[in-house]
Image (cartoon, rainbow, N blue to C red):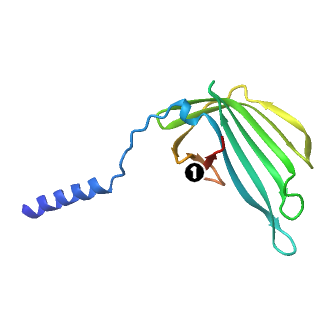
């Protein structure tokens, strides 16, 4: 009997210490307000010597009137035209903050690409639904936690943006 009690108590202690702490956070719209930026360096694929790389700069702007914009600029290859924007996409919409989550509803997207689609093209999302991401802000770094769908299965994903204003 004492052994059973010991194992029950031991199991409870292990469970208690192994559970993740739940932090109660109540962010407000003002916490997100401003401009946030993330830069990726992407290899384009093999060529004779190796890979060619280009930058992708993503900027999210959260306004005080619950409007947001996500602009993604694609820059030229490092060895050719690294400062030239060769493509861009801008999504506009609304957002709402609830506790530690942001819910974004995209309303329209305008994009262009230098070689294949040089004239800006706008798509309106008439039946758009909001999508949510948990987020946290630490030392002017905004980290979004969301689910992405590469290939064939959902994957927990995170992306961090640095405050730029």
Q: Residue at x 57, y 51 (%)?
A: 157
Q: In the image, residue 129 lies at what x, y percent?
A: 63, 30
Q: Secondary structure at mark 1?
A: strand
Rendering coords of residue 73 (x, y %)? 79, 47
Q: Is residue 106 above or below residue 150?
A: above
Q: Look at 73% across and 29% down and name the residue there.
A: 125
Q: Is residue 137 visible?
A: yes
Looking at the rendering, in which quadrant would you find the N terminus? bottom left
Q: Is residue 154 something one can see in this rendering?
A: no
Point 43% across, 38% down: residue: 25
* Residue denoted by label 1: 158
* Residue 24 position in % (x across, y down): 39, 39
Q: Nearer the viewer, residue 31 or 133?
A: 31
Where is residue 21? Give x, y as percent: 35, 49
Residue closest to the eye, 54 or 1: 54
Q: Quadrant of residue 131?
A: top right
Q: Is residue 94 above or below residue 150?
A: above
Left or right? Give the position of 113 relative to 129. right
Quadrant in the picture for the C terminus: top right
Q: Residue furthest left?
A: 1
Give the residue at the far front of this rendering. 165
Query: Which residue is farthest bottom?
Result: 49
Q: Quadrant of residue 133?
A: top right
């Amino acid at each position: 009997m004492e052994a059973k009690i010991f194992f029950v108590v031991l199991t409870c202690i292990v469970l208690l210490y192994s559970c993740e702490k739940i932090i109660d956070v109540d962010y407000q719209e003002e916490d997100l307000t401003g401009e946030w930026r993330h830069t990726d360096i992407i290899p384009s694929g093999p060529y004779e010597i190796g890979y060619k790389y280009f930058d992708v700069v993503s900027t999210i702007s959260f306004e005080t009137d619950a409007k947001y914009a996500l602009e993604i600029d694609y820059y030229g290859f490092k060895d050719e035209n690294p400062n030239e924007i060769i493509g861009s996409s801008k999504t506009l919409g609304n957002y709402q903050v609830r506790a530690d989550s942001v819910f974004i509803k995209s309303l329209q997207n305008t994009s262009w690409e230098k070689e294949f689609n040089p004239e800006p093209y706008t798509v309106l999302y008439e039946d758009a639904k909001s999508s949510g991401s948990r987020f946290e802000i630490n030392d002017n770094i905004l980290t979004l936690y969301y689910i992405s769908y590469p290939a064939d299965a959902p994957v927990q994903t995170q992306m961090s943006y640095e405050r730029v204003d």
